[in-house]
Amino acid sequence: MPAPPADGLAVQDLTNLDVTTLTPLSPEVISRQATINVGTIGHVAHGKSTVVRGLSGVMTIRFKQEKERNITIKLGYANAKIYKCQNPDCPNPGCYTSHGSAYPDRYTDEHGEWVVVRHVSFVDCPGHDILMATMLNGAAVMDAALLLIAANEKCPQPQTSEHLAAVEIMRLRHLIILQNKVELVTEAEAQQQYADIRNFVKGTVADSAPVVPISAVLRYNLDVVAEYLCTQIPVPVRDFTSSPQMIIIRSFDVNKPGQDAEELMGGVAGGSILKGVLKVGDEIEIRPGVISKDDQGRVTCRAIKTKVKSLHAENNELQYAVPGGLIGVGTQMDPTLTRADRLVGHVLGYPGHLPDVYDQIEIKYHLLRRLLGVKQDTDASKHGEGYKGPSITKLKNKEILMVNIGSTAAGGQIVGTKTEGSVAKVQLAVPVCANVGDKLALSRRIDKHWRLIGLLVIPPVSTMTRLLVIFATVAGTLSIQTDPPMNEAVANFTALLGNPDVHKFIDKVLMDAPPPPSPGHRELGEDLGGEVVAGKKDDYPFCSNCKTIQSTAISAYFLQQITDICDGPGNADSLSTEDFCGYLRKGISALNQVLNGYIFVRSRALQLAISTCIGRGQCPIEDAYNAFFNPIVPGRLVDFTKFPYCPPHYWSFYDIETCYKKVTLKMILFAYDQVSEACDEYGDEGLDEFCGYFATDADLGLGLVFGFVGVHEQATGYCVRDQCW
């Protein structure tokens, strides 16, 4: 029998593994991996991340923009072990406490011996209204939730209502309500708000949920929260014997720029196992996998086949992983496939045992009675007694909606409806893995934000369009793929951007266009629920918001200018420009994103936005010195001397047009990969803003790279100076 490890954690032994004997509380399981997922939900700035930090010791706010604005933007994750004191004289609730995931299973202090009784994985959701889609992705893996309500604010706030409705739709049945920030109010005010909370949750899934007054910053009553996580939330029933199936909610590349080929590691997928046990050495498949489209818009998916090389739960190494807490799966997969969360929403499991892939589904829907998540005027004198806000209208044919399926947020268009039975057919923007009987969340774009409007179910009689899935080993062994996701239409469109006639056409439109209109102060301040701050040179709470609104509006304005010129008669002055305008008229979103990124740089949208925001007192003067202004940055991002494609003594083209097309395509792929590596290496050295835009969307990133690092100029040099043709 192996000796116990020095870290105080139980040993996992694959040679003696019998999955039929495992439970969520088995010592070898609970020692290293969380077996229950608990979400933190509620309105923005009500203390969700602070509670997680108090229980786990982990700060889930990690990214620069999150720290600047002190809000959660991406899903945050942290694990915690909950311990119970074995001393019978230890009084409740002080006999419960919590520590990090790597803490020993047993320890002794002045109160007696403590033993781990639960291992919890916290899913910290953003509370801001514009991040509702992110919250719904997190709800897909939750077994229970902590609903945070700030004691110093009126209850309910908009996202308090919307998040509660969301977890009801996602079939969550176990909640604990935390009345946070009680240190900021009097006892009478706290008791009055308790009554308001009870009235708010009456008739909902939280009707019988306990309400615990806490102070997360002072750690007051967090031991009660730890106790209730053990006594009020039952251990979920888990399926350990079925074929494993995991939904991916994160994916990333762990390699450092410049790492030797012999030391490269495969891509990592993070997520939660829904059923089955995943083991080191297992052959696995990921669906939908690599998605591509042809010129006719037909979608093809290549399932990714690879092998499990390692398993981790935070810093704990695993030999096998079970359903429950979040884990990281190290694979032999090409790491470029997992970079920047590219596999989020995909499903991982054994080959041949995963759900089918669909791009069109028939659904049965149930709409909410009224719109949630917005501040509403419910004045009875205006609307009559009993008015609780605007009702939600029925689904309309050709309407664009957002569908949350597992951890995927997919756009979809209604292509058919039946009033009888509330049935609709939805054409999805991206392929998804789905099963008959799955419950999904439905959102509609209202006032520029996605708002939750209802519940979807895929009925047993559903007709779903199954996509052709080509089962191919994309990376059985490490073979470095530098190309970003690029289908044929995007490739041809990007090559056209390198054509001199198209380049001149775009620059002429940008120069001749009237100055773009500027958003007003209302959009800058109130979009995040606040007011414009003036006169406080050390505090710029809306700087990021100002730059985003201004630069997006400017870029969209110039994109519309180009579209209008293309639609006008006789404005395309060459065959290449006509081809460019023809692609633009197709309205393919990926092409618009590529052009949007290119225009963003060529029109100096961010520079114009920053200048405006500084002038209005929204941003500090120091913001003028960023990567987009610095002429040295492009050369720092991409070293074109390493571009090996077209030495004049080795290759030649029949004409200069072919040269432009071929060299541009090769060069943009080369530059994209170099920028991606540079962002990983220099992300905290003044490039974080540029890299943030670059990582937003693969097609937008292509356009940004094309304009910012001078791909057109470099390709021209290759084709003219080096005479590749």
Image (cartoon, helix red, strand yellow):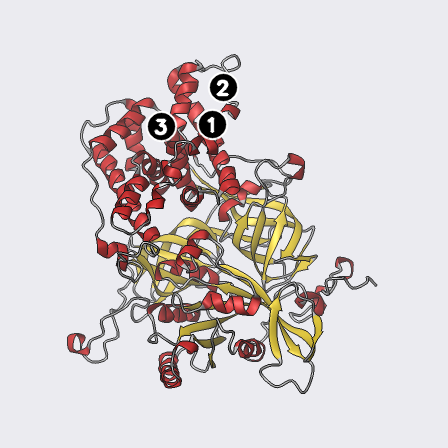
Count neighbours of disc 3 (C-alpha within 10 A) and say few if under 14, some if 14 to 19, many if 20 or more: many
Classify mark 2: helix, strand or loop: loop
The disc labelled 3 sits on which kind of residue?
Answer: Leu
Q: Residue furthest right?
A: 1
The residue tagged 1 is: 666
Q: Nearer the viewer, residue 368 or 337?
A: 337
Circles 3 and 1: CB atoms closer than 8 Å: no
Q: State how far apart marks 3 and 2 are (Cα).
A: 19 Å
* Residue 185 on image: x %, y %: 38, 79
| Circle number at residue 710 | none
Residue 465 can be seen in this image: no
For residue 459, above or below residue 641: below
The residue tagged 3 is: 496
Q: Quadrant of residue 493?
A: top left
* Residue 444 on image: x %, y %: 32, 59
The disc labelled 1 sits on which kind of residue?
Answer: Lys
For residue 544, above or below residue 36: above
First in sequence: mark 3 vs mark 2: 3
User: Which residue is found at the position 47% from the left and 39% from the top?
Assistant: 485
Count neighbours of disc 1 (C-alpha within 10 A) and say few if under 14, some if 14 to 19, many if 20 or more: some
Q: State how far apart marks 3 and 1 are (Cα).
A: 13 Å
The residue tagged 2 is: 646
Circles 1 and 2: CB atoms closer than 8 Å: yes
* Residue 284 on image: x %, y %: 62, 50
